[in-house]
Amino acid sequence: MVVEYEDRLARFGLGYLRAFLQALGVELVVLNGKERKELKEELAEDLVAIVASFAARIYGKRGGSWKGDSGEGTGQG
């Protein structure tokens, strides 16, 4: 099995996965195994991506409902 980075295969439990693959006779080849960020830096980037995703969903829904409620036809706008 060929992967570019180890963390693309599994974020945690990679040792168990390696042992399982080895028991099945599958060789794991990591192409770019040397490039590794600090764990805290990687977790911070993941957290920022999650927060940005949820914020886009929340504000996207609110923005869509706000645009549709312009008060037209009610004499208020």
Image (cartoon, helix red, strand yellow):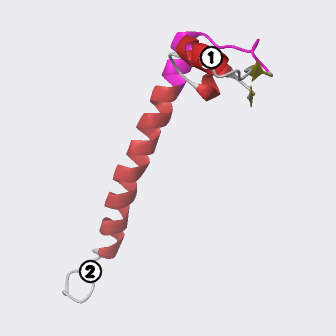
Task: Judge left or right: residue 17 versus residue 34.
Answer: left
Front-lying residue, 24 or 44? 24
Q: Amino acid at mark 1?
A: Ala
Asked if residue 65 is positioned above or below residue 13 in the image, the reply reads below
Element type at mark 2: loop
Instruction: Give the answer, above or below, for where 55 lies relative to 61.
Output: above
The residue under the point 66% across, 20% down is 6
Res 9 quadrant in image: top right
What residue is drawn where x is 32% and y is 59%? Answer: 62
**Which circle marks residue 77 in the picture?**
2
- Mark linked to residue 12: none
Q: Is residue 47 left or right of residue 45?
A: left
**Residue at which label 1 appears:** 23
Q: Kindly state the secondary structure of the residue where label 1 is placed.
A: helix
Instruction: Looking at the image, tell me whether mark 1 or mark 2 is earlier in sequence order.
Output: 1
Q: Quadrant of the C terminus?
A: bottom left
From which residue to which does the magenta span run?
32-45
Disc 1 or disc 2, which is closer to the eye? 1
Left or right of 24: which side holds 28?
Answer: right
